[in-house]
C-alpha cells in the first residue's frame, strides 16, 4: 500500500482512526481486517502476554486483537486502554508490564507500530497531522509534556514533518466540504475523555474555501464519565456500595474505594491481586447484605468488566433514540436489570453536562460572539448522540443550524484534508 501526501491521525481515548489525503478528492480511511469484521475505528488499547514456553518474550496485540487476547486469558494478560488520559499527567512516569518499564511514549509508539502492521501499511508519508484535544484530560494537565511525549512516539515511526491540530478543527475541515457559502461554524467534538469546541470562519476567496480560527475551549469530561455515572447508580449499589458491615460490635460503611476501579473496566482485573481484594473476601462474612458483596467478589474473580461495559454501552445507545430503555447485565450467577428513563440518566450526568455547557459558552466568549453570530453547528463524536448533549446546543441555536454525522471518521479525515492548505501554520503547529 502506498501512502498519499498527507496522513491524519485521530488518536482517541476510545478509538483511533487514520485517514489519507492526496492532492484532490476525499480523504480515505484506513481499514482493518479485524476478527469480528472489517473496521476503521480501531480501539485504543494494548495487551501484553508472556508465553509460558518463552517467558522472556512478549506477545503484544492492539485494538480488537488485544480485547480478544484479554477475554481469552485475563489472568495472564496485561490489558491497557484509555492510556491517552495519562498523556499530560506529570504523576504518570511509567508503568511496569511483565517486568518491563513502559513510559507513555513507549505505550503510544508500541500502539502505533501495531496499528501500522494491522493496517498492512508499507510506506508512511513524510507529513502527519495529529489530532490533539483543546484541553488534555486530568486535574492539572501539562500540555507541553503531552506534546513532548507525542513527538517522541511519532518520531519513532519515521515521520519527518509532525504537525498537531486541535481535534474539533479537524472535524471542521471535514464539515467544510459541504459548505457552498461563507459561514461561521462552531464544532463540538465529544470523545471518550474530553469534549472540545472550536469556532471557525469559512469564506470563499478566489474560488477556494478559506478558514480563519476565531475561538476555542475544552473540558476533560465526556463519554467515559457518562458510563461511570450509570455504573455508580445501577451496578455498584447491587455490589455493596452504600451498604454496611459489622466488626467488633460496630456497624461501618463498606469503603467506597472498592468501587473506584469501575471507572475503567480493564482496571477491575487488577483488583484480584490487591490488598483490597483480600478485604472484600472477608467482608462476605461480615456484611449486613452478604449477597451484594458476593456479587462483587464474583464480578472481580470472573473478570466480568468487559461484559458490564457492553451492557452500559447498549443502555446509553438505546436511550439516545428512546425515552426509556432496559438495563440488563447477565454474567454467571449475576442478573441485574431495570428500566431506566432518559430523564433519570440525564439527572445522573447533570454535573458533566454543566461543565460541557460552560465550555460551549467559553468558546463563544473566546471568539467574542453571541450565539446569533454562529451560522452552523457541527457535532461529532459518540456522545454527541446523547439527547441531553444536543439540548445544550438547541437552547442556544436554531435546530436547522445544527448538524451531526460521521461521528468516528470526521476528525481523521479533516486532519488529512488540512494537509492541502496553502498556509498550514494557521491550523497546525509543531511541538514546541
Image (cartoon, rainbow, N blue to C red):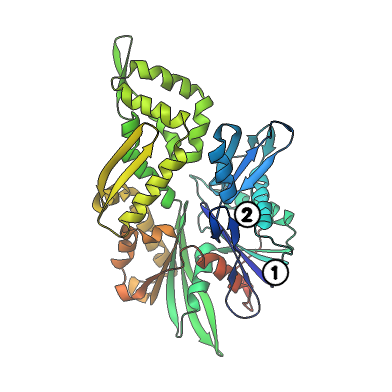
Q: CA distance from mark 1 to mark 2?
A: 25 Å
Query: In the shown orientation, is residue 315 left or right of residue 150?
Result: left
User: Relative to residue 105, is residue 292 depicted above or below?
Assistant: above
Cβ atoms at labels 1 and 2 below 8 Å apart = no
Q: Residues within 10 Å of mark 2 (few under 14, many from 20)?
A: some
Rendering coords of residue 330 (x, y %): 36, 39
Q: Nearer the viewer, mark 1 or mark 2?
A: 1
Give the percent coordinates (x, y) of residue 375. Answer: 38, 77
Query: Outermost residue, top direction?
Result: 248
Q: In the rendered image, which residue does mark 2 sit on?
A: 147
Residue on which disc 1 sits = 3
Q: Secondary structure at mark 2?
A: helix
Comparing 335 with 240, the one in front is: 335
Going by the image, does 421 lie left or right of 241? right
| Marks 1 and 2, the one that precedes in the sequence | 1
| Residue under the point 72% across and 56% down | 157
Badge 1: few (under 14), some or many (20 or more) residues near its Cα, within 10 Å? some
Residue 41, percent from left and from top: 54, 59
User: On the image, which quarter does residue 165 sit in?
Assistant: bottom right
Assign a secondary structure to mark 1: loop
Estimate the x, y position of residue 329 in percent, counting from the top left: 35, 41
Q: Could one spot residue 398 in this view of the protein?
A: no
Q: Is residue 379 visible?
A: yes
Question: Depth check: 149 or 224 in front?
Answer: 224
The tag on residue 223 is none
Instruction: Tell me if 422 is positioned left or right of 203 in this view.
Output: right
Residue 12 in the image: above or below residue 171: above
Amino acid at each position: 500500500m502506498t501512502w498519499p501526501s498527507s496522513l491524519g491521525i485521530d488518536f482517541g481515548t476510545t478509538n483511533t482512526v487514520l485517514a489519507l489525503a492526496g492532492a484532490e478528492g476525499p480523504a480515505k480511511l484506513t481499514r482493518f481486517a479485524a476478527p469480528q469484521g472489517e473496521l476503521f475505528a480501531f480501539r485504543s488499547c494494548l495487551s501484553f502476554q508472556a508465553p509460558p514456553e518463552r517467558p522472556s518474550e512478549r506477545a503484544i496485540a492492539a485494538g480488537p486483537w488485544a480485547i480478544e487476547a484479554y477475554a481469552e486469558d485475563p489472568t495472564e494478560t496485561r490489558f491497557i486502554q484509555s492510556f491517552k488520559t495519562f498523556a499530560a499527567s506529570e504523576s504518570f512516569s511509567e508503568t511496569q508490564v511483565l517486568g518491563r518499564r513502559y513510559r507513555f511514549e513507549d505505550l503510544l509508539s508500541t500502539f502505533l507500530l501495531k496499528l501500522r502492521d494491522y493496517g498492512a501499511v508499507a510506506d508512511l508519508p513524510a507529513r502527519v497531522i495529529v489530532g490533539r484535544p483543546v484541553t488534555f484530560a486530568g486535574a492539572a494537565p501539562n500540555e507541553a509534556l503531552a506534546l513532548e511525549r507525542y513527538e517522541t512516539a511519532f518520531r519513532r515511526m519515521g515521520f519527518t514533518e509532525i504537525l498537531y491540530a486541535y481535534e474539533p478543527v479537524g472535524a471542521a475541515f471535514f464539515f467544510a466540504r459541504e459548505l457552498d457559502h461563507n459561514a461561521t461554524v462552531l464544532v463540538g467534538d465529544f470523545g471518550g475523555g474530553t469534549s472540545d469546541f472550536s469556532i471557525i470562519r469559512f469564506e470563499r476567496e478566489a474560488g477556494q474555501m478559506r478558514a480563519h480560527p476565531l475561538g476555542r475551549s475544552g473540558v476533560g469530561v465526556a463519554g467515559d464519565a457518562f458510563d461511570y455515572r450509570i455504573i455508580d447508580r445501577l451496578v455498584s449499589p447491587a455490589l455493596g456500595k452504600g451498604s454496611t458491615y459489622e466488626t467488633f460490635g460496630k456497624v461501618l460503611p463498606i469503603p467506597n474505594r472498592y468501587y473506584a476501579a469501575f471507572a475503567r473496566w480493564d482496571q477491575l482485573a487488577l483488583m484480584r491481586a490487591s490488598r483490597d481484594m483480600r478485604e472484600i473476601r472477608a467482608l462476605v462474612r461480615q456484611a449486613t447484605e452478604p449477597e451484594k458483596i458476593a456479587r462483587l467478589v464474583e464480578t472481580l474473580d470472573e473478570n466480568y468488566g468487559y461484559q458490564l461495559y457492553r451492557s452500559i454501552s447498549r443502555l446509553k445507545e438505546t436511550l439516545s433514540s428512546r425515552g426509556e430503555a432496559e438495563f440488563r447485565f447477565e454474567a454467571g450467577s449475576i442478573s441485574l436489570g431495570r428500566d431506566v428513563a432518559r430523564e433519570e440518566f440525564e439527572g445522573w450526568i447533570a454535573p458533566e453536562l454543566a461543565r460541557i455547557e460552560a465550555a460551549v459558552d467559553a468558546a463563544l466568549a473566546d471568539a467574542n460572539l453571541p450565539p446569533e453570530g454562529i451560522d452552523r453547528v457541527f457535532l461529532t463524536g459518540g456522545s454527541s448522540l446523547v439527547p441531553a448533549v444536543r439540548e445544550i446546543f438547541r437552547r442556544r441555536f436554531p435546530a436547522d443550524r445544527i448538524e451531526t454525522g460521521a461521528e468516528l471518521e470526521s476528525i481523521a479525515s479533516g486532519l488529512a484534508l488540512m494537509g492541502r492548505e496553502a498556509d498550514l501554520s494557521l491550523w497546525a503547529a509543531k511541538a514546541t
